[in-house]
Each structure stands twice: as C-alpha cells, then as structure tokens.
Amino acid sequence: MGETHGLLFHVFVFLLAALLAVPITKRLGLGPVLGYFVAGILIGPWGLAVIREPEPIALFEQFTALVLLFMLAMQATPRRMSALIDGRFSLGFWHLLLSFSIIFLIALLTGLVWTEALVCALALSLSSGAVARHAFAAHYPGGSPLTETGERLLLSQSLTVLPLLLVVPLLGIEAAATEGSRWPMVIRSAVVVVVIGLAGPALLRHALRYAVSVGLDEVFTALALMIVIGLLLFMQLVGVPMEIGALLAAYLMVRSDYGNAVSVATRPFHGLMVGLFFMAVGMTIDFATLFNRPAETLSLVVLLVVVKAWVLRTLLRWSSVPRRQRIWLATVLSQGGELAFVIVHFAASWGVISAKLDAQLMLIVGLSMLTTPWLLYWAAKRDVIPAAQQTNTGIEQGARADSQVVVAGYGRVGQIIASLLQQNGFRVAVIDQNPDKFHALREAGFVGLYGDALRPDLLEAAGAERAVVMVIAIDDAERALELSAIVRHRFPNLTVLARGANASVCEQLTSAGADRAYSETFETALLMGEDVLETVGVSPLEAQAYTESYRDSNESNRIEDQT
C-alpha cells in the first residue's frame, strides 16, 4: 500500500510541476521544453527537494529515456530516409563530423583521456530536436527551406544513435579490465539488430494485419504496445541494452505498412513523454560543479554554443536556406540536446566516463539549452523573412507546388483525384480505413494513413494544418457531412471540396462546411481535380492541360476496372 501511495504521489508531483511551469515559460517565450526542464530542477534535490530519493528519479529517467528514443526513431520514416539518401545527407554528415572533431580537440586540451574526450564529442555534437522543432513551428511554416533543412539535420543525427550505443561500451577500457570484455555484448547486440531487422518486418506485417482485420482501434493499439514491450523484455533477457530495443521497435513500426497509424496513435503522448524526460533530467542535474567552478563551466557552455553555431552557419552557405535565415537556424541547433543526455548517462553506466564528468556534461548540456531562447531573440531580428517568401522553394510554379492535398477516401473518385495530382508532381496524403484500399494506395506509392478520417489527430498527421485543399471522397454520406463540419471547424483556412451521391447531398455538404460539392462521375472527378489544381496555384490553362493529359493516358480505365 505504501509503495502504491508513493508512486501516485510522485506522478502527481510530476504532473503538477509541469502544469505550473510549462504555461509560464511558454508565456515568457521560452517554450514548453525548457518549462519541463525547469520544473524538474524545482522539484528535484537542488530545488524544493519534493522528490529527493535517487531510486525513483533514476527509474523515472530510465523509463522516459526509452520512450524518448522510441519517439525519436519513429520520425525516421521511409519518406524522410529517401530524402536523405537522395543526395541531401552530406550536410548533416559534415555538420556532425566538423562539430565532433572540434569538440574532441577541445576536450583533449582540457586534459581528458581520449576515451572520455570521445564521449564528450559524440554527445555534445548532437542538438536538441525538441527545442528546434518547437522553434520551427513557432516561427517558420512547414515546407520552407529552413524547416526542411533543419529536419534533415536532426534526422541525420538521430541515425547516429544506434551505432553510438553499440560502440560506446567498447570505450570503457578500464572498466573492462575488471568486469570483463565488452565485445561479447556488442557482438550479441549487433547480431540481434541484424536478425530482427531482417525478419521482424515480415512477422510484424502479419500481426498488424490481423489487428486491422478485427476492426477495432483499441486492438491495434494494444498489439503495437505489446510488441514494443515484448521486444524490450527480450532485449533484457538476452543481455542487450534496452535502449537498442527501443530503437529497433520504432524501426519496425515506422517501416511497416501501418507506420502512420502507429505514429498517430502515439502522437497525443509524444509531447508529454518528451517533457517528462526533460523533467527527469532536470531532477538529476548537479549544480555543485557550477557553484564550485562557475567561470570554467560557463566558459565551456559559451564555447560549445559558439563552435556549433559557427560550424553550421558556415555549412549553410551550401544549402537552400536563404542567407538571412542561416544565423537563426545555426542558433536554434547550437545547444546540446536530449540525445546528449542519453549518450552521457549510457556511457557513465558502462564505466566509460566518471560520475564527476557525467555530472559536468549534464550541467553543460542543460545550461546550453537555457541559452537558446535568448540567442533566438537576437537572431530573429536579423533573420525574419515574410511567410510568403519562406514557402518559396524555387520550384517552378504549377509543376510541383510546395503544398499538400489531403484526400479522405480511396474509392473511385478519390483514386482519380489522387492519381491526377501525383502524376503532376503534387504531394498527396490519402486517408482510408478499408484494409484492401489502404494496401492498394500504398502499392500505388501514396502517403497513406490508415484509420477513420473523422479523427482530428489523423487529419493533423495527414498535414491538414498546412494543407491547401481537403478532398472528401468517402462513400458514407453521413460521415462525409460530419467530416465536412469537423474540417471546417478545426481547419478554417482549408479549402474543402466534397463529392456527393446527388444534388441533395451536395447541398447538405456545402451547408455542413464544404466550399464546393460535386455529384460523383468520372468526369466530375476530373472537374474536381482541375479545381484542386487551380486552388494549389496552377493557372486555369495548365490545370485544364493536366486533366486532358490524364484523361488521354487511359489511366482512368484501369482505375475503374480495379473498382
């Protein structure tokens, strides 16, 4: 009974501290991430000491670190990976390499042995994705050169985590002399990664298809959660770090046919779990180093921020980011981040670095994150560019617009509209909850989201917040009316085009919130598609040419045959 009371008390304190601190820091312009971090400091041993026992703090930090790694790895979608492979990986590679090299040399000059200096460089060269993404959302629209470049840089550094977790234990040379060689564990981990990476996708595909066939969202969510927990338990059983298990679980999920559905199911918890991780880190920060050596500590923080900002600012000359925005992007990625906390603690747990260096590095990373809002305030004065210019990617207008169309329903009309847009280079996200249609749209190469289009979180995952057009092409008239009302209420700036079975239904759709509604025929689908093209910025003559070309290609006959 006492243990249950203690657990409930700790959970209550965590949530209360977050509810008090986060709104304040957000109003001050510091962002929610630093609010969670400050909340952890306040309730931890160096604050009000509401929670001072090391056991619950350590357990809470380990749990949130595993969730954090899973959430970060879920962002490595096949589409984002393809973008890196298509010649855009070099910027992230050089950013990490140059930052690592300079920090490694500085660490050696401070008197650290090479293994400790290596851990310092590996950890401190990583930036905070949580802080950066909040800054992107607050200042720049999605799809701009700045945000896309920033996302690629963050994804590049996320891909280094798994190799680091395999290599770091080998650096504990002194600990290995007393505890035994680390090579068996590393080899065992590598074998497990390869075997699960090769065999896991096929097994997962059958399991998730079974859950989808049941037709209940809670069954799908329960199975996904069971698979993740089961994989973590398996890692613990075979003696492989659970951090590797969390990354592997996310890899399997995100690369499955239902990766988007898993992302949607976990999205409501993403911000809270990342925030709780920063609270756990805030409770573990040891400020004794700052009080004992303030000048040295603050100097290292400034040096870290300056080095990382200078390296990235220099490399951005060879990027598509406008010149006036480069300082801003370099500043937002100049601090240490959540992955640095994970790597540092992981290295300390394997005896690679001392507890003293562990505490010092945690403090440096934490203080560097606190500098970001103030530096961004200065950088924003130089780098602010009107939103209309931010979304101009330099792509010829009409050939491949920097906008997204969300299509709800992959039936006859939905297929035609989505194929017409895809054929002419536009980004399309399709939502459907029929397993066969979902499989068909994935085979056709569309970005697919499995589930009920009436779910607001699914619409947000499809990009409805930044999309230009929403196409409602679902068969059920009642659900189409409800969806029209939901979209109009939650996304008022979105142009809504809907199809109805007859003129009466079309009238109801426009009353519910659709901007325009059409009766369903093939030619009407083409007319809707032409309307969509004009709405996303194509001239009327070009839109007509696109639809005529699509009609002449006879692709419509193939689609009708399939249905």
Image (cartoon, rainbow, N blue to C red):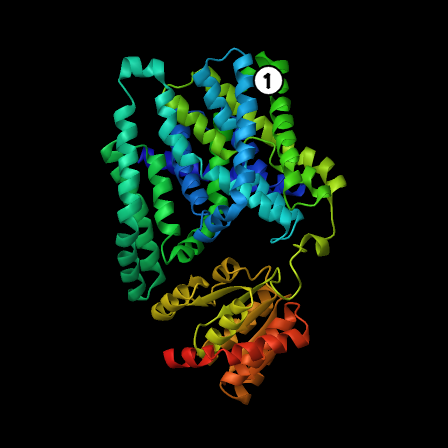
Q: Is residue 464 left or right of residue 206?
A: right
Secondary structure category for the residue under label 1: helix
> Of 386 and 92, which appears nearest the observer?
92
Instruction: Residue 163: tell me if it is visible.
Output: yes
Q: Residue furthest right?
A: 381
Residue at position x 67%, y 77% in the image: 541
Q: Position of residue 133 (x, y in %)?
A: 57, 44
* Residue linked to disc 1: 297
Q: Position of residue 433 (x, y in %)?
A: 39, 68
Quadrant of the snapshot with the C terminus: bottom left
Relative to residue 213, is residue 76 depicted above or below? above
Quadrant of the snapshot with the N terminus: top left
Please identify the quarter of the rendering in which residue 404 is found: bottom right
Residues packed near mark 1 inside 10 Å, few (<14), some (14 to 19) or many (20 plus): some
Residue at position x 30%, y 34% in the image: 190
Relative to residue 120, is residue 542 depicted above or below? below
Residue at position x 59%, y 72% in the image: 496
> Of 218 and 224, which appears nearest the observer?
224
Relative to residue 409, is residue 51 depicted above or below? above
Given the image, on which type of amino acid does mark 1 rest?
Thr
Q: Is residue 355 left or right of residue 378?
A: left
> Of 154 and 375, which appears nearest the observer?
154
Q: Position of residue 540 (x, y in %)?
A: 67, 76
Q: Is residue 218 left or right of residue 305?
A: left
